[in-house]
């Protein structure tokens, strides 16, 4: 998939949202220099077994792919780019590692020609205790975070097309999964495998799918704040869940085994760990299903 193809239509939203999430881009009016395509390896060293590392990934614009499977260190992978300012840099401070595109910045005075830009990171994460924080701007993202040891995940994006899958259970308890995104299309799959205690999701105008399939280990609290959005919540039949909706302008549709208790409360019967979900929407559509 060519980078930028799905995010060009939300470039203006990127400019605003990227400032909010700490990622900024700056190019002079003369434009940035497109050079030959470079393939560069990425290596992030690891810590002693059992120690928890903090990994910060700061990514401007392009395509970001993350999967399990690093055979050494914390991260291995490749960066493919044709602008020198996209070159990845690594900073290590104690147990904290920051992988970023430090030089690529732009303002509204000189937007680059995205048709000619190439910027893709393809990263493998190791089976190590990890606190993961990702800051990204306008990008296409495909993350498989299954089978890792994620103690905390924080994800902040601008205008994104993002697919996140916990394809197999997280091997340690995740204290918090926090997501903040702008005008985006975002889908999370198999969230039951994330092994989280709390999930906070903040979204702008967009389409958001949160699928709680997987192996839910404990009672969990989910807080969702969204503007004018379409939100789909998928909870497998048999998993006890309750959803409280705050927002008089929201349209709620029920499917599967969901039922309405009162004007603002919806539930699904079941046994085992309970999902408690609060949805605050300015306006939009909420679909509950299995």
Image (cartoon, grey):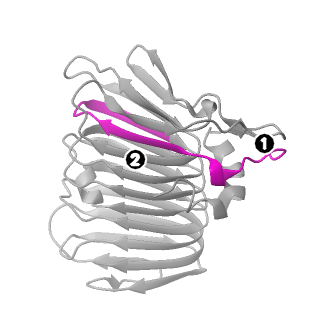
Question: Which residue is more in the foreground, 158 or 81?
Answer: 81
What is the x, y in percent for residue 117? Answer: 61, 47
Q: Quick one: 287 or 218, which is closer to the camera?
A: 287
Residue occupying the far left of the picture? 271
Residue at (61% x, 30% y) in the render: 84
Q: Quadrant of the C terminus?
A: bottom left
Stretch of the chain drawn in magenta: 107-134
Specify the label residue 180 is tagged with. Answer: none
Q: Nearer the viewer, residue 195 or 66?
A: 66
Above or below, 97 relative to 240: above
Which mark, by number, is residue 65? 2
Residues under labels 2 and 1: Cα distance? 26 Å
Task: Name the outermost residue toward the front.
Answer: 36
Residue 138 shown left or right of residue 128 in the figure: right
* Numbered disc 1: secondary structure: loop
Circle on res. 107: 1
């Amino acid at each position: 998939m060519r980078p930028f193809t799905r995010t060009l239509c939300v470039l203006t939203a990127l400019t605003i949202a990227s400032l909010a999430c700490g990622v900024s881009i700056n190019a002079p009016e003369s434009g940035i220099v497109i050079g030959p395509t470079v393939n560069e390896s990425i290596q992030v060293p690891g810590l002693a077994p059992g120690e928890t590392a903090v990994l910060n990934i700061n990514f401007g614009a392009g395509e970001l792919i993350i999967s399990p499977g690093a055979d050494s260190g914390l991260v291995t992978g490749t960066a493919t780019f044709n602008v020198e300012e996209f070159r990845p840099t690594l900073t290590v401070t104690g147990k904290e590692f920051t992988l970023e595109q430090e030089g690529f910045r732009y303002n509204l005075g000189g937007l680059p020609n995205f048709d000619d830009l190439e910027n893709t990171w393809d990263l493998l994460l190791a089976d190590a205790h990890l606190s993961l924080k990702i800051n990204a701007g306008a990008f296409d993202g495909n993350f498989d975070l299954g089978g890792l040891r994620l103690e905390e995940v924080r994800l902040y994006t601008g205008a994104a097309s993002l697919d996140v899958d916990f394809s197999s259970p997280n091997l340690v308890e995740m204290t918090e999964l926090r997501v903040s995104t702008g005008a985006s299309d975002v889908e999370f799959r198999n969230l039951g495998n994330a092994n989280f205690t709390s999930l906070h999701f903040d979204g702008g105008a967009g389409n958001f799918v949160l699928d709680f399939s997987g192996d839910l280990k404990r009672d969990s609290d989910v807080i969702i704040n969204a503007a004018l959005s379409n939100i789909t919540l998928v909870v497998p039949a048999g998993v006890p869940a309750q959803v409280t909706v705050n927002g008089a302008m929201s349209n709620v549709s029920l499917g599967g085994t969901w039922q309405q208790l009162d004007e603002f409360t919806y539930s699904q019967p079941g046994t085992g760990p309970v999902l408690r979900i609060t949805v605050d929407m300015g306006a939009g559509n909420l679909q509950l299903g299995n």
